[in-house]
Structure formats: C-alpha cells, structure tokens
Amino acid sequence: MRARGSGEPRRRWSPRVLVLGLGNLILRDDGVGVHAARQFASVAPRGVLVIDAGTDVFSTVHLLTRADKTVAFDALRGGRKPGTVYILDASDVANDAATGSLHELGLPSVLQTINGHKSEVVVVAAEPEIIEVGTELSPALQAAVPEMVRAALTLTSHWLSLSPAGIRPATDLSAVSQLVKLRQVETPRM
C-alpha cells in the first residue's frame, strides 16, 4: 500500500449515478425537487450520490461532468393537471418553449455551458399548482413526490445493474412509465 503524497496520482471519485434535487423551498411547489430528493435519499441504492442543489445548480457542475447518469428532480410547467409527473430528457426541457423549468438559470443553462463529458440527465418533475411564498407543498404535489421517487428508483436501479460499459447508451424513457406503474405520467413527445 502506498502512502498519499508518494508520487502516485490521486484518483477522483466519480459517481456513476447522481440524483439532484432542484427548486426553491420557500416558494411552495417550486421546492418539489428538493422534497423528492430528500425522500429519495432514504431509499437510494448504494452507489447513488444524492445532492440537494436547491437553486444553486452551478455548484454541481463538477459532478455533472463526471457522472454517467443523472436524475434531476424539479417542478416543470407542462400544461397538465397539477401533480402530473413528467419524465423527459433534460435536452427536451431546454429545447421546448412550451415546457420548461421554473428556474431561469437552471439545469438547461448549466448543461449548455458544460464542455466535454457530461452525464445523461433525465428530469423527473411534477406540474406545480401553487408558486407563492411558503414552505408546504400543495396536496397535489405531496401526492406526486412518492411517484417521482419510484420513477427515480426504477431508473437508478436499472442504471446500476448495467456494466460500466453498458451504462453509456441513452435511456429509453418510454419504458420507465411501463416499469413504474405511475398514475399520471407524461413523457412529452418533442
């Protein structure tokens, strides 16, 4: 065994799977991503790094560039009934004017600034009902959080079951809602 500082380069730890909780906890339903990440942390498979990023997505750039796969929990306006759960690729959020994150400089902006390797990012989000000052989620979003967690658990467990070489191909998101029997899941077609 070699001691640190003995000339051997230190390895940087890179998560294969990263889970980010995004949102503003003091704007009620906008904080659903953070609530979902906190609930997910209690059931996360071993080897999944869970980060409560809140509204500071930029602080996670170093992790987004090293992870193989990422789930980002967030609130998303998609025009459906409050509490509807969405599962989509992060690039679809950035490229579709009809749907989008509630954060102006959120995940899509950060992903556009990253050069080089970046992980595949799947957004698991819920349609908000109430965006106003307060810390409690609306009943519709309280009901959506367990569904969001189940979807992310299915995704992360699947990714971890793949060999390191097999984790690279893009995920077939249409299979997620079949794997997880969710009440109100939309996989927007872009």
Image (cartoon, rainbow, N blue to C red):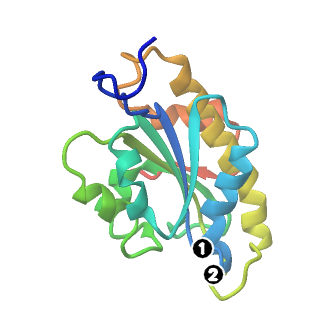
- Tag shown at residue 30: 1
Q: What residue is shown with label 2?
A: 27
Q: Is residue 190 visible?
A: no
Asked if the residue at tag 2 contacts the one at tag 1, i.e. Cβ–Cβ closer than 8 Å, the answer is yes
- Mark 2: few/some/many CA within 10 Å (<14, 14-19, 20+): some
Mark 2: which amino acid? Leu
- When the figure is inspected, residue 124 is found, relative to residue 47, above or below; the finding is below
Query: Separation of disc 1 and disc 2 at Cα?
Result: 5 Å
Q: Nearer the viewer, residue 106 or 53?
A: 53
Q: Position of residue 95 (x, y in %)?
A: 29, 60
Query: Residue at horizontal 50%, vertical 41%?
Result: 18
Question: Hey, which residue is sitting farthest left in the picture?
Answer: 115
- Left or right: 17 with respect to 127? left
Locate residue 102 relative to residue 66 in the image: left or right: right
Kind of residue at badge 1: Asp
Residue 67 image label = none
Question: Mark 2: which secondary structure?
Answer: loop
Image x and y of residue 170, in percent:
36, 31
Residue depicted at x 41% and y 60%: 59
**Residue located farthest toward the top when viewing the structure as drawn:** 1
Secondary structure under tag 1 reads helix
Q: Is residue 67 left or right of residue 24?
A: left
